[in-house]
Image (cartoon, rainbow, N blue to C red):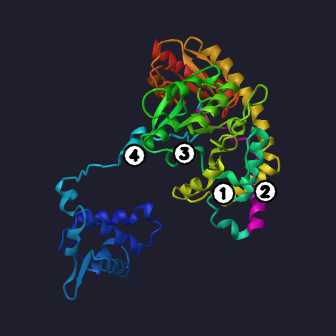
Amino acid sequence: MFKHALLESVKAWVGDPTHGALPLHARVQRAIRQLILDGALDVGRPLPSSRTLAKSLGVSRDTVESAFSQLHSEGFIERRVGSGSFVSERVQRLPGRSRSRRSGVEDKTTLRLSRRGNAIFQSGGVRDFLTPRPFAPGVPETRSFPLQTWERLERQVLKEYGTLALLHSPPQGMEPLRRAIAAYVNLERGARASPENVLVLTSSQQALALCSTVLLDAGDRIFIEDPVYHGASKAFGAAGLECVPVPLDADGLRAEYLAEVNKMPGEGPKAVFLTPSHQFPTGATLSLDRRLAVIEWARQRQGWIIEDDYDSEFHYAGKPTACVQGLDPNERTIYIGTFTKSLFPGLRIGYMVLPSQLVAPMTVARTLLDGHSAPIPQLTLARFIEGGHFGAHVRTMRAVYAERRDVLARLVRQHLAEFVEPHVPSGGMQMPCVFIRNTPEREAVESARRVGIDLLGLSTLYTSNKRKGGFLMGFAAHAPHELDAAVKKLTNVLRELHY
């Protein structure tokens, strides 16, 4: 007979609500199998008869017979006519049997990753803010999204396409969406795009990963802004690239550094990463003469310009500057855009506008990552853009975000003036605040997180040692009264660190 403890283990497994979706015989079978895998049942150990076990568990004999038959077919038990059922000798060869839990010895196999895998793991990846907690940067307001309009357009898509919408999308993306994106960036961003050179992706992060691996080899160098968007630096580092930081000023990246570095010994960087419309995190806009200087550098060096236009829709003074891609006649610029911030994070649609010679290589490389984006959201988004709903939503949210930016700036000056200096941006969805006191940034960020506030430390975004302490405060996802409460809570956090 089973020992009482083993019988109780089987009863607990069978009665666990998390296993409720399984048929009863499968629960009995898996409970016994787990005891064998754990080493609780030794090789050659006899099992009780199906009649006895059924009575003990309060189930039918047929249920136990079905469980035993499955265990036998899987090789876990042997059934001998006239003798009963026993734990099979074959389970002795199962991994881990020689170091069972009963022996008290755990198999601590050393985790071995590739250099790239280890770099990715050690970097910590890129953390998405899953819930819109106060001041999480880059999180849009979703409560006022025109959901009924989106649902209506999605129903139109399903009615028109039927089951065709359930099939694979072409890896380059659905043609209606590529056409809509090309028309939008040409009109609103001054780009030079056609549907043929648009590649639809799941995110701008995927675009950065593709650029890192398709355009550059491990060990190659790439210019990056300093400070820089952390998702970019981590993507480049994971690909084995050497990031060369370029300092910034009020006019953005100091383009003269590109030529100076190329005069130094060794092979110069082969690409430059930019957020020219609204630099992350400082908010600076790259001046026209520097844009032209970067384009000239790429022409002379046959380098690549990776332009991330992550939230250019939200500008609050005048009109946004045209993108670098539209100024580049040499087809050396890769333009990256996303709808995650302008619409909603769950959409998971981004894109690249590519030089014509890169369309095929990038599309093939994309098939190795996730194959394609889901067709139904692509087709719905295409109608959302073409019907004017995207433009209307952006205009509405631009006014909302501008008000929230101004509210946050006032609140910071009112409550946090003794700790930080706000740098009020002319666009975007977050405000950098620089410490004016010797405040421990990491402790400030961690203490804020413990009380429900998400801040992004500024010093972590620098590659060089010329770091400025402080944090980014996202303002888009919260109404004025919510910002007010969160700022007062943050004030208490900072005061506790100083007093």
Name which of mark 1 and mark 3 comes first in the sequence. 1
Which dot marks residue 116? 4
Q: Residue at x 39, y 75 (%)?
A: 25
Which residue is the site of mark 1?
A: 173
Name which of mark 2 and mark 4 comes first in the sequence. 4
Q: Quadrant of residue 163?
A: bottom right
Tag 1 and tag 4, C-beta contact below 8 Å? no
Which span is picked out in magenta?
A: 136-161
Q: How many marks?
A: 4
Mark 3 nearby-residue class (10 Å; few <14, some 14–19, many ≥20): many
Name which of mark 1 and mark 4 comes first in the sequence. 4
221 sits to left or right of 420: left
Tag 1 and tag 3, C-beta contact below 8 Å? no
Q: Residue at x 78, y 66 (%)?
A: 160
87 sits to left or right of 304: left
390 or 482, nearer to the observer: 390
Which residue is the site of mark 2?
A: 152
